[in-house]
Structures are given as structure tokens and as C-alpha cells.
Image (cartoon, helix red, strand yellow):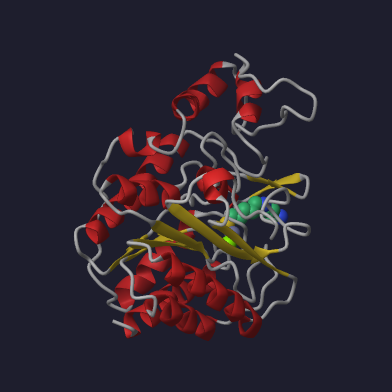
Amino acid sequence: MTELDGGILIEPHEKPSRAETILGRVKQEQLGEVLPPRDFGLAPVLRVHTRDYVDFLKTSWADWTAEGKPGEAIPAVWPGRGMRHRVPKDIDGRLGYYSFAAETSITEGTWDAACASANVALTAQALVANGEAAAFALCRPPGHHAHADLFGGYCFFNNAALSAQAFRDQGARRVAILDVDFHHGNGTQAIFYQRDDVMTISLHGDPDLVFPHFLGFEDETGDGAGEGFNLNIVYPPGTPFSIWREGLETACARIEAYQPDALVIALGVDTFEDDPISFFKLTSADYLLMGERIGKLNLPTLFTMEGGYDVDAIGVNVVNVLKGFERTR
Ligand SMILES: NCCCNCCCCCS
Ligand SMILES: [Mg+2]
Ligand SMILES: [Zn+2]
């Protein structure tokens, strides 16, 4: 795997040791039972992602290697302003049509990994739908940047969106998604932007200054039936938890007023003070308080793992959110 960053190909920030470190900490802290994912197939994925996008992802690596390309499949050309938004036949054109960023490579294992990550989320979602108070889906790759037919930001299938849709399909009337990852959950917002049955809220770094750059501003409040059911809370570089928690309070007030039947937390911990690609200043102890506040919403809660790139601290930080949550139960 590689990541195009600063004009060179680096070892990806989104690396396997992230998941291994979190799992190790979950086991060390005896947080709860660790279960393997069940296979839900593509039906729940197709409730959120388009058929042509899923078909593209499935064959993208084979199509890329069939043209004898030496490296990983990295998009390099996009339908810019004034160009045609139609799907070309050529793999280079399709990579650009179905993505919004170039730091995310597709490799031989991407399809299987994206499917497995979706199955992890859906397995945890089923547990909560069937009565568990909460579950943590250790998803890798993450999902909150993926749109219905766009990959990017290390994301291919939007695990949080799939889970919210699964709650809806299983009878939940309203679902709230709260994205606490450092970055805007642009894919999650876009997927539900015209809908009032899934409320989407994200706290994140100012998109004027940081990825995803082109969505996530505070004037984006939803469209049509979805007007008023999207909330973006934007903060500048250096934001500490004492400020960030005010946004969390605002988000929780909106969620309480919405009275959802289920809550999905897009849990990224790249808000951490030492995260290599972010600029907030949360400490490991702050994640206990974050989890506690989320727990006080007293809702059936599914956590889907999103970002967090300080690998040494990621296990403590993720488990601290879950431990803080558990304190309220
Ligand atoms: N120089 C780093 C650029 C990173 N761009 C993508 C960030 C995706 C975060 C996923 S949570
Ligand atoms: Mg966010
Ligand atoms: Zn992030």
C-alpha cells in the first residue's frame, strides 16, 4: 500500500497496525466480547452505494492490472468544472469519476477489505438492533468520507451510513449519526442530505484549511426534506477539548431533541493532540469525557471506527471513549 502525500508515495497513514493496536488494547482492558464479522453480502451495501460504483470497485484492480500498470491504482484525472460527468470506459477515467481525492490507492486487497469492513459494521449494528446497549465496530478501512459513488480519504464503503440505513430498514424511525472524527464526514452528509429520517452531525477542522476542503461548512444544513437535519460544527487549529466539548454539547442537544431510535458514532480519534495529519489538541484523558457525554444520551449506540493516525496512542484513545461510555451504563 502507498499514499500520495506531499508529492511522494509514503507508507499510508491508514495502516494495519492501527487496527491491531486498538484490538490489543480492547483485549488488554477486557472491554467486552470480541466477535468476528458475519457476511451480509452486498444487499446492505447497495442500500447506500450505487450499483455502478460497487461494480466499479469490484473490478477496479483487475481492470487496472489488465492494462499492465506497474503500481497501485491511484486516480489522476477528474471531471473538472465544465467537463462531462459521464462514466468513461477506460480505468483511468473511471478511477477519477468514482473518487474525489488522490491519497487513496486501490490495491489487490481493497475490495475484500472494504467488504470485510462493511461486514464488521453490519455485524455490530445487528447486535445493537437486537438489544445490545452498544457495540464497537473495529472497521478498517474507515468509511465516513465515502459518498454513494465516490471513494477518497481512505474510505470506500461508508460503514456508518450502511449501519444507519440498516437500522432504518429494521424498523428504526429516526437515526442520528454523530461524527467526532477530526475531519468532516462529507460522505455521510452527502448520502443523507435530502433526508429527515437520518440526522447527520459532524464536528471537524475548518475545511477552508484541511481535508476534505470542499464540504463541511456551517451553512450546510440539509436540503429539501433534509433541511435542518444536517449540522456542521467547525473549529480552527489548536482547538482544545474545553472548546470542542461545547460543540459536542450542541450536537447532543440536537440529538436529544430529535429523539432517534438509534445513534451511530463515527469514531475517529485524529482529534488527538499528537495526530500527524490533524490540528486539534485533545488529550487521551479527554476521550473518557467524550465517551461519558455520548453515553449520557442513553441511546442504543453503534461506534464505527473511522480515523486516528498516531498509532502509539490510538488504542488508549479509542478504548478511553468506550470506557467513558461504559461508565454511564
Ligand atoms: N497530508 C495528509 C493528507 C490526508 N488526506 C486525507 C485525510 C483522510 C482522513 C481520514 S479520517
Ligand atoms: Mg467529524
Ligand atoms: Zn479523520
- 255 relative to 151, above or below: below
Residue that appears at 45% across and 83% down: 288
Residue under the image location 73 percent in, 51 percent down:
213
Residue 155 makes an appearance in the image: no
Quarter of the view holding residue 32: bottom left
Residue most extreme to the top: 89
Work out whether 29 lies above or below 216.
Answer: below
Q: In the picture, residue 296 is in which quadrant?
A: bottom left
Residue at left 48%, top 75%? Answer: 317
Q: Quadrant of residue 8?
A: top right
Which residue is at the front of the view, 199 or 137? 199
Give the quadrant of the N terminus: top right
Depth order, front residue of 129/69: 129
Where in the figure is residue 262, as x and y percent of width and height?
Answer: 34, 61
Query: Can the viewer see residue 20?
Result: yes
Residue depicted at 64% across the width and 34% down the height:
74
In this orientation, which residue lies closer to the viewer: 200 or 108? Answer: 200
Q: From this viewpoint, which residue is outermost toward the left? A: 130
* Of residues 154 and 179, the one drawn nearer to the viewer in this rendering: 179
Q: Quadrant of ligand 2?
A: bottom right
Residue 121 picture location, percent across and down = 35, 52
Relative to 296, does residue 150 appear above or below in the rendering? above
State the quadrant of the C terminus: bottom left
Image location (x, y in percent) of residue 79: 72, 27
